[in-house]
């Protein structure tokens, strides 16, 4: 079946502009995660959605970052007034359930470059 | 807060040889899971192997095995009979038993020499 997909694959934007990144999870997966990967570093957790529960936003680095998810489908990560330090690969993952015995499946990521 | 440390930024191995990647972690939880992920240049994160903390037996998946030392909070990955396709960035990760986020180490870049 189809895996997690993300769009766009690459995004170049000017400092100060807003960007939207999209994630399509695997069908039927109730949990969805966003991570950020700066160059040469590991992944940092940003936000997590589980079904209709309130999202865990504890990883969002500033109020310029927000994310939405409609039901158990598509999610968008929005970065307002982008800064150069926002340049990174943004990875989305989904899983069938929220507990640790469910594997997280990752998408290919969106590489964001802020000039 | 949980932390994951990978002290080897780069490793190299000859094709068909064995290599071990190191990982240590810090947690006060008793119920947790540990993972090794592979990230090739395509950026796709691929789960290599996972270990439940409550299991004493080390996990194995074909040529991949782990050495899980719970008291020492150490979780190393051994790759046997290395293949050119094993070349990638490898990340160690931790997750609480109650789920939610993964916490990743900084990664180890593995090169496989023919």
Image (tube, coloured by chain):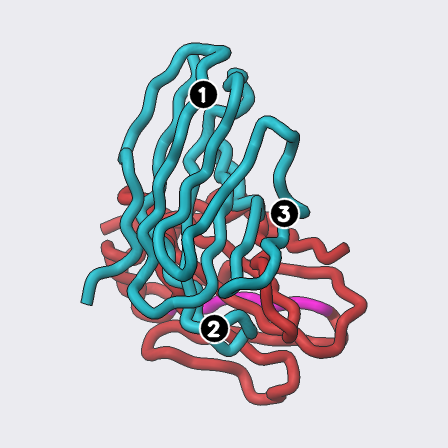
Magenta-span inclusion, residue B78: yes
Q: Disc 3 designates what residue?
A: A57
Q: Disc 2 designates what residue?
A: A97
x 28%, y 34%: residue: A8
Q: Chain of mark 2?
A: A
Q: Disc 1 designates what residue?
A: A18
Tell me, yes or no, whether the two marked residues, 2 and 3, touch with CB atoms within 8 Å: no
x 56%, y 60%: residue: B93
x 35%, y 60%: residue: B46
Q: Nearer the viewer, residue B8 or B61?
A: B61
Q: Are marks 3 and 1 on the same chain?
A: yes
Please state the horizontal and vertical placement of residue B29, each as a whole percent of the image.
76, 71
Q: Assign a secondary structure to mark 2.
A: loop
Magenta residues span B73-79
Neighbour tally class for label 1: few under 14, some 14-19, many 20 plus, Cα within 10 Å: some
Neighbour tally class for label 2: few under 14, some 14-19, many 20 plus, Cα within 10 Å: some
Relative height, residue B56 to residue A96 (above, below): below
Q: Nearer the viewer, residue B101 or A40?
A: B101
Chain painted in red in the figure: B
Can residue B40 be spotted in the picture? no
């Amino acid at each position: 079946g189809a895996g997690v997909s993300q769009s766009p694959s690459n995004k170049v934007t000017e400092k100060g502009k807003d960007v939207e990144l999209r994630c399509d999870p695997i069908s039927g997966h109730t949990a969805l995660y966003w991570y950020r990967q700066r160059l040469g570093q590991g992944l940092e957790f940003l936000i997590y959605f589980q079904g209709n529960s309130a999202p865990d936003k504890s990883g969002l680095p500033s109020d310029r970052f927000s994310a939405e998810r409609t039901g158990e489908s598509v999610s968008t990560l929005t970065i307002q007034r982008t800064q150069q330090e926002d340049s990174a690969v943004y990875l989305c993952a989904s899983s069938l359930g929220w507990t640790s015995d469910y594997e997280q499946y990752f998408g290919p990521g969106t590489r964001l470059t802020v000039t | 807060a949980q932390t994951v440390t990978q002290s080897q930024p780069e490793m190299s191995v000859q094709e068909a040889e064995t290599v071990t990647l190191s990982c240590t972690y810090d947690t006060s939880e008793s119920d947790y899971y540990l993972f090794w992920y592979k990230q090739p240049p395509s950026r796709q994160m691929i789960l290599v192997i996972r270990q439940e903390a409550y299991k004493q037996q080390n996990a194995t998946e074909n040529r991949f095995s782990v050495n899980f030392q719970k008291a020492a909070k150490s979780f190393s990955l051994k790759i046997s009979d290395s293949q050119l396709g094993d070349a990638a960035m490898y990340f160690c990760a931790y997750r609480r038993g109650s789920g939610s986020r993964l916490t990743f180490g900084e990664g180890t870049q593995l090169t496989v020499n023919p």
